[in-house]
Amino acid sequence: MTDTSPRATSKDNLLGICNALGEDFGFNPLWLRLALGAAFVLQPVAIVTLYLALGAAVLISRIVIRPQRAAAPQALVDVSEPQPERQAEQVFAKAA
């Protein structure tokens, strides 16, 4: 399956606050950007203050609670037994 969620690049973000909140809470950051943009028309000073406060909260949460990195997937194949492909290679090697 393909992932249809938009991926924002660094030049698409102002400070990455909406993207960070979307990652933390599991929603598309576009909805937060649209809400902040619509509210900015009515109360620009309050929205800029709110945006910066959200940015400070994200910064503090990222410093205090470091996000857990996903562990690299481990191989589930038992390497002690030869694989079918390897068995075929061994048979051909013996025949040669």
Image (spheres, rainbow, N blue to C red):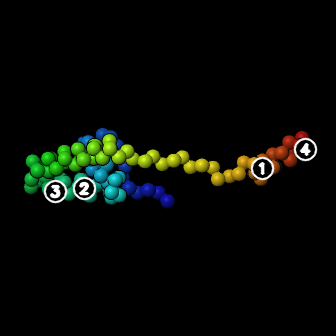
Residue 29 in which image quadrant: bottom left
Can you give x and y, in whole percent of width and height, for residue 88 in the image? Answer: 81, 49
- Are the residues flagged by discs 1 and 2 in contact, CB closer than 8 Å? no
Dot 4 alpha-carbon crowd within 10 angstroms: few under 14, some 14 to 19, many 20 or more: few
Dot 3 or dot 4: first in sequence order is 3
> Looking at the image, is mark 3 or mark 2 nearer the viewer?
2
- Mark 4 vs mark 1: in front: 1
User: How far apart in space, not on screen, are marks 3 and 1 (Cα)?
Assistant: 62 Å
How many marks are shown on the rendered structure? 4
Q: Which residue is mark 3?
A: 38
Left or right for 40, reference 7: left
Instruction: Give the mark nearer the N terminus: 3 vs 2.
Output: 2
Out of 68 and 42, give the one closest to the viewer. Answer: 68
Give the residue at mark 4: 95
Q: Earlier in the sequence, mark 4 or mark 1?
A: 1
What kind of element bears circle 1?
loop
Q: Can residue 42 be seen here?
A: yes
Q: Amino acid at mark 3?
A: Ala
Alpha carbon of mark 2 to alpha carbon of mark 4: how far?
A: 66 Å
Question: Looking at the image, which residue sits at the far front?
Answer: 64
Q: Amino acid at mark 1?
A: Pro
Q: Position of residue 52 (x, y in %)?
A: 19, 45
Q: Secondary structure at mark 2?
A: helix
* Circle 2 residue: 32
* Label drawn at residue 82: 1
Q: Which mark is residue 59?
A: none
Q: Amino acid at mark 4?
A: Ala
In the rendering, at what x and y percent does residue 96 appear? 89, 41
Q: Residue at x 39, y 47 (%)?
A: 67
Mark 3 vs mark 1: in front: 1
**Direction from residue 95 to residue 44 in the image, left or right:** left
